[in-house]
Image (cartoon, grey):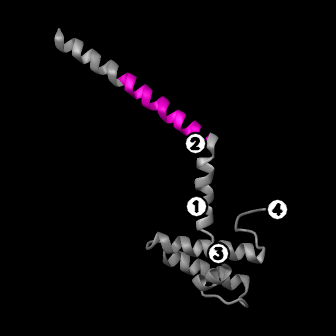
């Protein structure tokens, strides 16, 4: 009998704790979106991932006189070479291509308009 009461208390207590944790998590998310903490974190990530045109050209190994086709060829080669290797290097190559897309005014692959 005492074991049954103890088990019931344990089940009820864990249910109450689970609901309280869930509500606290929801409230924390709501507070973060109200204060702009989430947006600030995203902006900091974007700011830190920006690279200069010179750095982008150096990463891809192209010059200012390189054609867009040559840039894409270098990008594809380096991206594929690191597909099973370093995710960090692969992301640097991708960011370099994005930077040069913005500089050249070229639309990213797969977009319309």
- Say which label, 4 or 1, has the lower sequence index: 1
Report x, y in % for residue 92.
Answer: 55, 74
- Say which label, 4 or 2, has the lower sequence index: 2
Report x, y in % for residue 81.
Answer: 50, 78
- Say which label, 3 or 1, has the lower sequence index: 1
Instruction: Give the side of residue 108 with respect to residue 23, left or right.
Output: right
Quadrant in the rendering for residue 97? bottom right
- Say which label, 3 or 4, has the lower sequence index: 3
Magenta highlight on residue 24: yes
Q: CA distance from mark 3 to mark 4?
A: 20 Å
Q: Residues within 10 Å of mark 4 (few under 14, many from 20)?
A: few
Q: CA distance from mark 4 to mark 1?
A: 28 Å
| Residue located 54% across and 33% down the image | 27
Residue at the spot of label 3: 97
Please name whichever residue, 41 or 5, is drawn nearer the observer in this view of the structure.
41
Residue at the spot of label 1: 45
Please name whichever residue, 92 or 44, is drawn nearer the observer in this view of the structure.
44
Mark in front: 4 vs 2: 2
| Residue located 39% across and 22% down the image | 16
Mark in front: 3 vs 1: 1
Asked if the residue under mark 2 is in contact with the one under mark 4, i.e. CB atoms within 8 Å, the reply is no
- Per the rendered image, the range of residues in magenta is 15-33
In the image, which disc is placed on residue 113?
4
Mark in front: 3 vs 2: 2
Instruction: Give the side of residue 81 with respect to residue 64, left or right.
Output: left
Mark in front: 4 vs 1: 1
In the image, which disc is placed on residue 79?
none
Asked if the residue under mark 4 is in contact with the one under mark 3, i.e. CB atoms within 8 Å, the reply is no
């Amino acid at each position: 009998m005492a074991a049954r009461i103890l088990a019931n208390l344990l089940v009820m207590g864990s249910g109450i704790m689970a609901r309280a944790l869930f509500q606290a998590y929801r409230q924390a998310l709501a507070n973060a979106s109200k204060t702009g903490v989430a947006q600030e974190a995203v902006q900091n990530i974007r700011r830190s991932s920006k690279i200069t045109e010179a750095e982008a050209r150096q990463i891809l190994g192209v010059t200012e006189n390189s054609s867009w086709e040559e840039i894409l060829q270098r990008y594809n080669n380096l991206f594929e070479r690191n597909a099973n290797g370093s995710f960090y290097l692969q992301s640097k190559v991708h960011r370099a291509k994005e930077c040069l897309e913005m500089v050249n005014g070229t639309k990213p692959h797969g977009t319309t308009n």
